[in-house]
Amino acid sequence: MAWVVGIDTGGTFTDLVALDRESRDVYTAKVPSVPSNPAQAIVNALDQLKRERDVSLSNVSFFAHGTTVATNAVLEGAGSKAGLLITEGQRAIYDMRSGSRPTGPELIDPFYQKPSSLIPQSLTYEVPERLSFDGTEIKPLDEERVEEATLALKEQGVESVAVCYLFSFMNSAHEERTAEIVRRVFPECRISLSSAVLPTIREYPRLSTTVLDAFVGPVITKYFDHLQTQLRKRGLKTNQFYIMQSNGGLMRINNAVNYPNETLLSGPAAGVVFGTYLGHISQAENVLTFDMGGTSTDISVIESLGHSETRSGRIAGQDIGTPMIEIATLGAGGGTVAHIGEDGLLKVGPRSAGAVPGPACYGLGGEEPTVTDANILLGYVDVESFIGGRMKGDRSLAEQALGRVGRHLGLDALQTAVGINKIANVMMAVGLRTTLTEKGADPRKFALAAFGGNGPVHAARLAKEVGIKKVVVPIYPGISCAVGLLQTDVKHIYMQSFLRPLLSASLDHLNRIFGSLVKQATLEAEFEGFARDEVALVRQLDLRYPHQGYELSVDLPDRELEAEDLRRARSDFDRVHEKVYGISAPDEEPEIVNARVLMMGTIPKLELDRAKESNRSASLALKGYRDVYFEEANGFVATAVYDRPLLPSAARIEGPAILEQLDCTTVIQPDQLATIDLYGNVLIEL
Amino acid sequence: MTIDPITLEVINHRLNEISRTMEHLLFHSGYSPILRESFDGSSCILDRDGYVITGAGMPIHLFPYHRTVTEVIRLHGRDMQPGDSFLANDPFSSGVFHVPDAAIITPVFYRNELIAFCGSIAHKPDVGGMVPGSSGAAAREVFHEGVLYPAVRYWTEDGVNEDIERIFRRNSRTPAEVVGDARAQVGCTRIGADKLRELCDEYGPKMIAHSFREFVSRSEARLRKQLARWPDGDSEAEAFTDNDGADLDKPVRVRVKITKEGDSLELDFSGSDPQARGPVNIRPQSVETGSVLALLGLTDPRIPINDGVRRALTFVNPEGKVTHARFPAPVNNYFSTTHLVYSCVQRALAHFSTERVSAPAGFGTGATAIGYLRSLSGKPAVQYELQVMSLGGTNHNDGAFGAMPMTHITPNTPLEVLETEYPVRLTRWEPKCDSAGAGKRRGGLGCVREYELLEEADFTLRLGQFKFGAWGVEGGKAPNNASCTIIYSNGGQERLPPLASRKLQAGDRIRIESAGGGGFGSPYERDADLVLKDVRNGYVSVEMARKDYGVSIDTETMTVLAEETRSLRFGSLV
């Protein structure tokens, strides 16, 4: 037996998917997360796998994991005590947080506050040293001062030290020498160098990213050690033990301790990877992922089967410059609370009832109505079906909660439920449209990939509102992130800033930079255990028009650069800029900001099996009928309810219809037609 | 006609989506870097009578759109056609603050009936006038501040009005950028108009018009409800600019008297000084927007800014005052005077508002420009930067460090980018110890920023003010004042006035000290551990901890000496 296992830790649940490569048996599980000890939930999920499928860990040949440990450390301010060494005279960089622009009312609120610094000034030490913009030394490193500062930090009990000197991305000598000194006088200290963490121009994002690295590094290291020990003790043997990164690629767990920042948005990234796979198997080039969970909804744009990247990520207000998958998050999930706003109108969110007390219908003490409570009253979701029937809801509690809020507007419980559903839908439709608009993308060319516990409840309705022609609901919508963990490659991005006008850049210099990035990539690929032919390298330039505050990447050929390549990069850049922003400036010579190398190491991926074409009809899976509210009908319609796992491939289902499965419900609107494809996906055509 | 509350909330989301989409298109299809980097632009939806319904982007722009559209209606109300767009940048006939702020207004027709207006404002890099950027300290008339376009027809169904565009282009030092931005503005308002028409297709134009009225009256009701909770009465506040823009020794008074009765406010600026010779003057739209932002900041910043807010307010602001400049007075330095208005209103409102009180942000926010004959690319270049101060302490929190007042953006000029593009070195950038106004909640700290020039350069300083600083409230202390010192390579030093230009040489250094925010509440009431934390962070010195805060710190152990602190704070009798 050779099982591959993906485990995604979420805020509420830890999801497991396991596949036996030989028998093609697929097993899925959802166990409650254990925030105080996330590894425990993983062990519980694996125990369940062992119990129900008799799979011991020694039979697992591939293990991938998405984690929120780093995320939670930042959200809860529970990282480690860290110190910071900076260039003398530059104490404002971190506190100032250049480029911050509060959104919404905060923009005009005199009570506005910037996020607090993860390392206070009292643990920040200035070091006399200075490099010029081209990396030449203006002032040598004061090694004595480094030593004094390190001893002072040791005295104060820090576990790690971040070092961010000006222009270290052009010349890392001072930072590296600093690391040697720190290692000598304080060997047990973890060190984060900005020239290693993010060697790119713009001191604030580089510093903030390096500080995050130092803040979560020790926490992540402890967690990975603990997890490895636990799993090894239980018999896990494989070296193929991977961690998901925010960039959508995996990395070996023993390498992951070197990149704690990369795990900050590990789970949602796996969802986007899965969305890409879904696009691939359902012949949709362009996919909009719509992952609606209990507290929020993640949206991401995949064009031509490639996800979008951002370098201005943020978590709990902390800025991260590490390239990562671009994901927009809306504060609307199943547990989002409805209430009467100051303007007297019905509001949905931004507060969430979370997992505890959760929606009113859970009966765990939630008094306020949520999106899920509304969905119950409207007949979309069955109270019997929470978490595959392991938890039962109480419809009357939902009704009471809805009535309490609706009363203020003269609405009964049902009218309130209709209102909440409408408003939640318009919020999500706006979110989907805005995300597409910002990419200059046309909704008609996209498929909506709906997952998360609540995505498939709303997706068909939203597609209609947004003008999307096709909805894909995967076979396991509730554990999509776990599946995504098993469908990607090992991926690392190496960057080096090099600010020059494109055409006048020295080819020699550029080739030297690429040479050193390629060398780093090759070494790391070896460390990750790859043979030469399993690794693909992509060379890229990040370009911008002069003075722009953002840049875009264009690909280069994988060889020594020639003058012609730069000219081609220029026209490629004009084209990409035109595509993204609707305009270009071909008369202006773009500037190089960064050289980048992407390293991708191919690893085996989980391929879901295709079923045989069947000519059986959907009626086999018909469970019965229930009354479901549809806006078009302006009321309730007797609607067929199907047991989704029993639906044969190629089955056709006419809307309105409800498809129920263990952890998720799919709603098909009147006049929509759904089919089951060979992978068991539900395709809804509009 | 009635509209159910659910539909109203749905339309609310849809309208906000439209104004945000317009804003996005403006910022991403505009040409000039100043627009993208300073976010100095906005979009707005107004009803058919020119009342503001909702908007996005710079909140400071929103309230005055009403004046601009009123002028469009006055001039063109009878012959406006579908497809028209109007260009307005005249601070005297329309609602813009100064000449570089160009507004584009597009009337929205649905089946040939006027239903709304879509507007957009974007600060232009140059619209002519005496100096590059159009805003010069030497201006004595608005004619010195660029070419005025008094709501002229810039676009029609058939496309651009080439005559107007030719004049626009010809009167700018940055023709490509101004035309590129203006066209982006037209584009975004036309998309906004299309989307409003789609909304009418779905809900009908009557329903949309009705929802406009609802949003306006709901904002009004929210504000009135807040005002009703305050005691009736009146309160006054005043503050001074350092100079009148022409005579550097002549301060100018801004004064407001606020009378609160029931659920309305009257804001009376009659006590302000007569209009000045130099460009510190402002127009009523600046007074109104500064007042509204201060008021919402102390009541509820979540109240949507629309014309409902105006209905609860009465402005008394006679012409001929610095707060209501008469044509053709210069007005280009509107920002610092508007910030004074904002701070005075905040100060006067402290009399009524006890739940939300804020000390003022530091005075002096402005800009610097260093012009080099050759930048590192070999071409002449100007290093333009916004210089911001810090926010004041409030009854809830310490003031934010480094943000624009009124709209709390932190400019983004990475020093690594500056040094890569210009022959300059940023030798020092750090919070300045003891610069914040002390208080139970202190202000944000002031900052020291020091540049060393590597080549000769022309330095232009345009900061708000240095002499008259911000104040503390409810026992809080005043912060330091802003300043600018040139440290010449030959050893001499010169403190500059806030508006100045100097020719500098390689090796000369420019040292700018920004002002901290004012303090809230007695510093003696600040938790001694917080004071200790500030000392450890280098924000407050041991001496000032003792002097201002009455906290004695043992410098050996870095701990609070509790006994001595008690006696410093409460006297030895206790």
Image: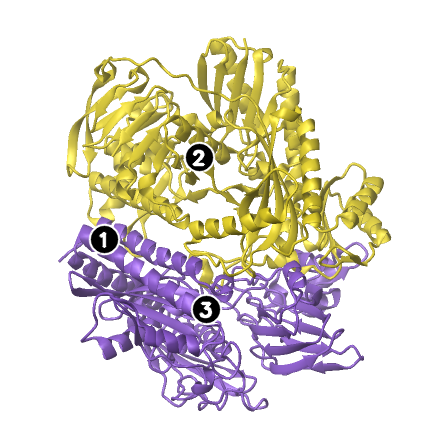
Chain purple in the figure, letter: B
Which chain does the residue under circle 2 lie in? A
Chain yellow in the figure, letter: A
Please tell me whether mark 1 or mark 2 is closer to you in this view: 2
Where disc 1 sits, the SS reads helix
* Disc 3 target residue: B176
Residue A633 lies in what quarter of the image?
top left
**Can you say whether B22 is above or below B256 in the image?**
above
How far, Cα to Cα, is label 3 from label 2? 37 Å
* Residue type marked 3: Ala
Q: Quadrant of the N terminus of chain A?
A: top right
**Can you say whether B440 is above or below B198 in the image?**
below
* Disc 1 target residue: B198
How packed mark 2 is, by other alpha carbons closer than 10 Å (few <14, some 14-19, many 20 or more), is some
* Residue type marked 2: Leu
How packed mark 3 is, by other alpha carbons closer than 10 Å (few <14, some 14-19, many 20 or more), is few
Q: Quick check: marks 3 and 2 in contact, CB under 8 Å?
A: no
Q: Quadrant of the C terminus of chain A?
A: top left
Residue B324 visible (yes or no): yes
Q: Residue at x 73, y 40 (%)?
A: A159
Q: How is the image coloured?
A: by chain
* Disc 2 target residue: A305
